[in-house]
Image (tube, rainbow, N blue to C red):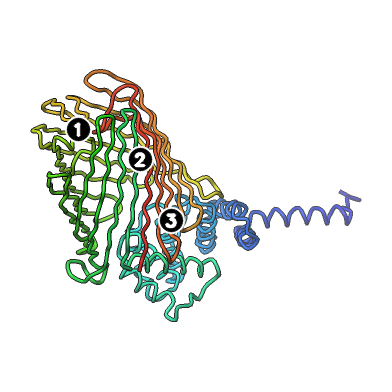
Amino acid sequence: MKGCRLSPRLLLGALLVTSATIATADPAYSIRAGRAALDANHPQKALDAFQRALDDIAADPARYDADRVAALAGKGYAALWLGNEHQAESSYRQGFAIAHSEADKKTMAVGLARALIGLGRPREAYDTVAPYRKVDHEAALQAAIAANLLGWNVLGAQDLQDAAPDGVYPGPNWLKALYRYADDYLQYGLAPKVNVGVHYSSDIDHNINQIYSADVLWPGKPLSDPRLNPTFWQLGYQQTQITDSVGQVGLSAIRGGWNSTPNRNWQYSINGGIGTSGHWVYGTVDSQLLYTPSDRWGLNLGVQREPIRTFTAVQNHILVNTVDAGGFYRLRNVATVGADYFHQSFSDGNQRNGVVIKATPEFVSLGRWPVSLGIQGYYRQYHSGVVPYDGYFNPRNYREAIGYVIYVQKFSPYWTLRFYSGFGSQTIDGTTSGVRDFFGTLSGLVAPYCALSLTGGYSQIANAYGGGPGYHRSYIEANLSIPF
């Protein structure tokens, strides 16, 4: 090997290549790169860097145990930034399981709660940060957001007080903004309100419904757990105008009741009233009972009594009494399945029994945009005992199956658009035809002044007003809620 020498330039190049290879394979180097990418507002680069760190750690987990916690925390943070709550949940859950210090556990719990809130699991989110909400500002903030989503606004207000005892949140600007959003939502939830609603619908049979309503809601102490939410008492008035090719008729009704949260598992509302149309006087009911011990499953029971809104049905004094009972089950990160059985008793002697089933897989987030896409399978079937004609659509056997594509976009923490596009078929007494169903809702809070919801749709699905091949109905409605 005599005379074999490396030139200084070649030696320097070899050292640089070796150093770069070692740095690239070092998890700490990738973690630092990920944090730098986050500071530079590049969440996708950060996510890639943290994933490289985790890949390197997997080759020698015992050696890089401490780095794994940091890499999982960084990956979860970047995934949340990109709107991928499923990936964030997985990272934070793994990190929480291996965290040794209380500081690391707290970091993982807060991140996991943020992911769970985004996935529509506020109960689990609250339970996750509950042990830390008295000792950490961000844990208290996430607890307040989850409590508001659960309807526990009194508890949420207390958590928000823990997050910022002097009213000024001690954190970065984006968390200060989130604190202000949470405070607006909680104050809105606790305030007395005036609700005003307008509805207009028209179908191919020239049946036009115009509905105007106004309600006052105010908080009180009885019937609810005062640590969770006040009882909200309600008093309102509704005016309905029905017009079709046969004639025109009006309905007027007053109503009252309350909404209550007796404990963390139960919620219920009781609302009843009296309506009139000419010399006809009738009673109305719209009440619900909910049992939701967790985000994973729940049960519901509903009772309704209302007139059928067609001219002929009102002239014949036809009321429909509906009782429905059902529930939902959520298979984590896979889908939610809901089913309801309903029984309807009509004042003309008709009886109807049916079932509704919905299956909704978990939504998919579209990267760095605040957009989610989902699908839903919907099935409804019923059988009617008798087939009179008193001014409402009443086949003996009815069945429909529809698949929906769901588009959800968040314009801000205050405003959300949901749009459903449905295609399927319905079978009416053995005759099958295709149907389409499109509807969307834009809802938001103009903090702290009012909440607004706008809904519109076009449907070919049969209902009490009409049905069959060629039938279609369009509708729009607006609801405004003003706290005072």
Q: Position of residue 17 (x, y in %)?
A: 76, 53
Mark 2 touching mark 3, by CB under 8 A?
A: no
Check disc 2 and give the amino acid type: Thr
Determine the CA span between mark 1 and mark 2: 38 Å
Which numbered disc flags the more N-terminal residue, 1 or 2? 1
Specify the amino acid type for callout 1.
Answer: Thr
Residue 6 horizontal side relative to residue 323, left or right: right
Badge 3 density bin: few <14, some 14–19, many ≥20, Cα 10 Å: some
**Residue holding disc 1:** 312
Residue 352 position, x and y percent, is 14, 33
Q: Nearer the viewer, mark 1 or mark 2?
A: 1
The residue carrying pointer 1 sits among few (fewer than 14), some (14 to 19) or many (20 or more) residues within 10 Å by Cα, namely: many
Residue 416: mark: none
Mark 3 or mark 1, which is nearer the start of the sequence? 1
Identify residue type, mark 3. Gly
Secondary structure at numbered mark 3 = strand
Name the residue beneath numbered marker 2: 360
Cα separation, mark 2 vs mark 3, equals 24 Å
Residue 396 image offset from top left, x and y in percent: 17, 24
Camera-nearest residue between 213 and 223: 213
* Residue closest to the eye, 144 or 65: 144
Q: Which residue lies under the disc numbered 3?
A: 444
